[in-house]
Image: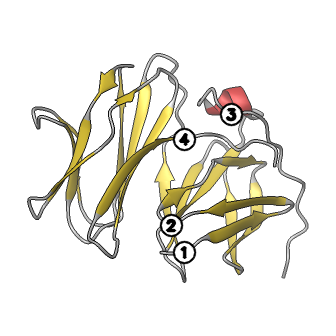
Amino acid sequence: MLLSLPVWAAQDGNEGLYEMAAPPDSAFIRVVNITDGQVAVEMDDWRQSLSPRQAGDYLYRPVGKAQISVAGKPFAFEFEARSVQTLVFDGASLVKHEDIYFNNRLKALLVMYNLSDQSASLQTLNGAVNVIGPLLAGNSGEREINGVKVALKVALDSGSELPLEEVVLQRGRIYTVLVTPGSGGVQAHLEESHVATTP
């Protein structure tokens, strides 16, 4: 049964801080597409198209029950105040990851999702510092760090290393590292996360 839902509020979320973009006690959700094709995410009158191995924007809404459609498949959820959920779509199901509610204006937040079939760690490019992990397959983790220019890599349990683009981490922003399966092997990339803007 389709739920009768209020229209989602949305505004520019480039600040990267949840509370700067949404009413107090909002719930947040986003979808990660780990399939090889483009998928459409729909909720109420909001739409977003996700490329393969792309993380969508965070969407915020009032607490309560809701229905979200991914690639034409309906999924029901219930949101609690100040909850943050990342839903990983594999073509058939959505796997939920509970994220932290980040509100530290003095740090940047790195969140890593290991969606590969082996353990993985996020490290500095020279391997001197272990930033997140090791994370078992299917797990996620996060770490607050100072705003800094940094070069990172993902180190896999197999011994493979996947360098990431150098990035300037800005305070109050959220950055996502996705480690995903692919036809050519495990892939990794880093992207800044945003709260959804009006379509």
Please state if 189 lies on the left or on the right of 153 as rendered: right
**Residue at image location 63% in from the left, 26% down from the top:** 15
Q: Secondary structure at mark 1?
A: loop
What residue is drawn where x is 23% and y is 44%? 153
Considering only order in the chain, which callout, 3 or 1, is on the residue closer to the N terminus? 3
Q: Which mark is residue 52?
A: 2
Query: Residue at the location (51% across, 29% down)?
Result: 173
Q: Give neighbour class at mark 1: few <14, some 14-19, many 20+ (Cα, 10 Å).
A: few
* Residue with the mark numbered 4: 193
x, y percentage for residue 183?
A: 33, 76
Residue 134 point in image, percent of width and height: 19, 52
Foreground mark, 1 or 3?
A: 1
The CA distance from mark 1 to mark 4 is: 21 Å
The amino acid pointed to by label 2 is Pro
- Which element carries disc 2, helix, strand or loop? loop
- N-terminal label among 1 and 4: 1
The Cα atoms of the two marked residues, 4 and 2, are separated by 16 Å
Which numbered mark, 3 or 2, is in the foreground of this view? 2
The quadrant in which residue 3 appears is: bottom right
